[in-house]
Each structure stands twice: as structure tokens, then as C-alpha cells.
């Protein structure tokens, strides 16, 4: 058997902003695994060639980030049902027979984080309001439905994208007008921002937040900054707040386990490592 270090990495363009290398390197050290996790900037025109070459160089798999999440699903030889449902993959495992196996762990990461940061959360407590209808929204909705939420309300600036998601997910998912977002918070027991609003470099979230009620579970997928306006106001109003960093950390757990053979845990040290 080879005694070469285990290799994995993340591909995207650009790649400098990714926190995955700090995170995986932290777990490698913590668990005493001899391995490396390498950021790789790969252009779309080279993507397939690189993905076919990496296993021959000893890589066990890669994470995939913007802008390649959809294209890698087309290149992969096999995909999990959840990746197919998402229409995007964030993890590629290089199998021993040379096949590329695509998975999407965003929904898993969202739910694992929600359960860790808001352990009192009950899926059947009432309607879940999802702001946004992009790729992250799709993963969040699938996870909510899997967890047993009976009533998901999506609202999005561009209505047709919300309608498409509702059509894809069936009758437990309904659509409301974007201008209604503030009012809908009065009846929701879970509120999740999956839009880019509030992120550094994007517009601030202007949705009225005075409808937020005490004990509502409020989650923001945006993690730069960590204390978004949504979470700041939610905390002032006595809501249970769930920040976006935890989702990023939890979605990496299944990938790390597949790459390096041990399951890491997400704790305060993990958060510090990712923020370093
Ligand atoms: P995406 O597919 O591009 O979707 C962007 C969403 O934001 C759409 O719903 C879009 O609405 C909405 N939006 C953008 N600008 C807006 C504006 N000015 N006013 C109202 N709505 C606006 O992106 P994504 O992949 O879903 O990612 C969305 C956010 O989630 C990003 O901030 C990303 O960093 C974050 N995210 C976090 C994690 C995590 O692990 N924490 C994982 C994935 C994503 P329209 O349809 O009207 O354009």
C-alpha cells in the first residue's frame, strides 16, 4: 500500500476567498491525519481535464465552488439523488474504479447547523418562510421538507424563480409576493434568508423586520458579515438566531469523511479556524 499523504482540495475561480483550506487543514491536524487540502483555481475550459487528471495524481476528491457547481454535475459519471435534485454539486469523490461521483451536502449542512444552533427547533411548529429562490434556497427547501416541515413559503424578488421551485417541490411549498415578506414574518415560526442581501458588497436587506416574533428561529445563510442586520434585529426581538458560518462548516463534514476517512466535529475551535 502507498504511504503517500492523502490529498483533496477545492476548485473554483476565483479561489482565494474560500475558507475550506483553513477548515480542512484544522481537522487534519486535530485528527492527526497525514494529508493536504489544496485550493486550486481552475477555469471552466479546463474543468473536465483537471477533474480527470486529479485522481491520477492521487487525489481522493474535491470540493467545488462558484462558478463550477452546475457544470461538474454534467461532467460526473454518477450523482446522488440530492445533487440531481439540486442541479448542482459541491463535492466530487474520485472512486477507485476511476468514476467521478457527485454529491451536494449544502442541505445536510443547513439542517445540521440549524439543529446545533437552535436545538429547540421543531419542524412541525408552523410555517417556514424562505427568502430567496436561488441555488441555496433549493438546498434549504429540500432539507426543510426532508425534516418534516409541512408548510414552506417562498418569496423572491423575481417571482418566476420562486414559482419554479414551488412547481419542483410540490404542494407543501407555496409562493408569496416579495412585498409581503415583512408581513409573512408575523406568522412564520422559522425564517431563513437565502438571498445574498446583507452580504459584504451586496445591498442591505430592506425587508421590514418588525413582524419578527419572540422565539421564532431565524437563520441567515450570509456569513460575511456574521452579524447581519437580519440576525441583529432578530436577536433584539428575542428570536433564536442561527448564523451562516455553521452551515459552511457542517456541509464540509461528509466531504472530509469521504476524503480522509474520519468524521470531524464542528465546535468553537472549528469556527475559530475557519475565521482565522
Ligand atoms: P444565487 O443562486 O445567485 O441566488 C441569489 C438570491 O439572492 C436570489 O434569490 C436573488 O433574487 C437574491 N438577490 C440577489 N440580489 C438581490 C437584491 N438586490 N434584492 C433582492 N434579492 C436579491 O445565489 P446562492 O448560491 O443561492 O447564494 C445566496 C446566498 O447564500 C449568498 O449570500 C451565499 O453566500 C449564501 N450561501 C451560504 C452558504 C453557507 O454555507 N452559509 C451556502 C450557500 C450559499 P433574484 O432571483 O430576484 O435575483
Image (tube, rainbow, N blue to C red):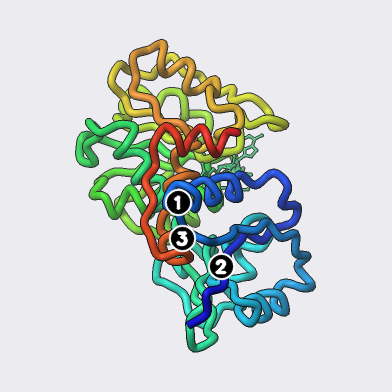
Is residue 162 shown left or right of residue 184? right
Q: Earlier in the sequence, mark 2 or mark 1?
A: 2
Mark number displayed over residue 59: none
Element under label 1?
helix
The picture places residue 38, in percent across and down from the top left corner, at: 65, 58
The picture places residue 95, in percent across and down from the top left corner, at: 48, 80
Contact? badges 3 and 1 (CB < 8 Å): yes
Front position in the image: 33 or 69: 33
**Residue depicted at 56% across the width and 67% down the height:** 5
Asked if 189 appears above or below 97 in the picture, the reply is above
State the residue position of label 2: 5
The picture places residue 108, in percent across and down from the top left corner, at: 38, 53
Name the outermost residue toward the top.
236
Mark 3 vs mark 1: give the one in front: 3
Place residue 62 in its image quadrant. bottom right
Mark number displayed over residue 251: 1
From the image, which quarter does the C terminus lie in?
A: top right
**Residue depicted at 33% across the width and 18% down the height:** 213
Ligand 1, image quadrant it occupies = top right
Amino acid at each position: 500500500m502507498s504511504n503517500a499523504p492523502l490529498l483533496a482540495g477545492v476548485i473554483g475561480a476565483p479561489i482565494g476567498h474560500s475558507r475550506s483550506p483553513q477548515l480542512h487543514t484544522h481537522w487534519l491536524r486535530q485528527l492527526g491525519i497525514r494529508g493536504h487540502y489544496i485550493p486550486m483555481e481552475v477555469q471552466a475550459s479546463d474543468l473536465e481535464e483537471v477533474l480527470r487528471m486529479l485522481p491520477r495524481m492521487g487525489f481522493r476528491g474535491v470540493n467545488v465552488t462558484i462558478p463550477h457547481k452546475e457544470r461538474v454535475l454534467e461532467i460526473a459519471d454518477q450523482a446522488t439523488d440530492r445533487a440531481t435534485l439540486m442541479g448542482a454539486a459541491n463535492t466530487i469523490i474520485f472512486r477507485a474504479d476511476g468514476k467521478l461521483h457527485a454529491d451536494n451536502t449544502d442541505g445536510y449542512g443547513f439542517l445540521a447547523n440549524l439543529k446545533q444552533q437552535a436545538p429547540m427547533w421543531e419542524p412541525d411548529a408552523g410555517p417556514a418562510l424562505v427568502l430567496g429562490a436561488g441555488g441555496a434556497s433549493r438546498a434549504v427547501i429540500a432539507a426543510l421538507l426532508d425534516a418534516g416541515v409541512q408548510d414552506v413559503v417562498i418569496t423572491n424578488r423575481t417571482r418566476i424563480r420562486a414559482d419554479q421551485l414551488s412547481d419542483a417541490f410540490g404542494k407543501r411549498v407555496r409562493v408569496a409576493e416579495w412585498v409581503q415578506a415583512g408581513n409573512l414574518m408575523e406568522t412564520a415560526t422559522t425564517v431563513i434568508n437565502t438571498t445574498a442581501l446583507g452580504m459584504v458588497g451586496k445591498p442591505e436587506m430592506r425587508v421590514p423586520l418588525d413582524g419578527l416574533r419572540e422565539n421564532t428561529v431565524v437563520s441567515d445563510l450570509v456569513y460575511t458579515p456574521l452579524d447581519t442586520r437580519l440576525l441583529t434585529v432578530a436577536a433584539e426581538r428575542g428570536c433564536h438566531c442561527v448564523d451562516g458560518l455553521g452551515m459552511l462548516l457542517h456541509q464540509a463534514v461528509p466531504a472530509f469523511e469521504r476524503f480522509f476517512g474520519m468524521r470531524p466535529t464542528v465546535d468553537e475551535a472549528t469556527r475559530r479556524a475557519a475565521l482565522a
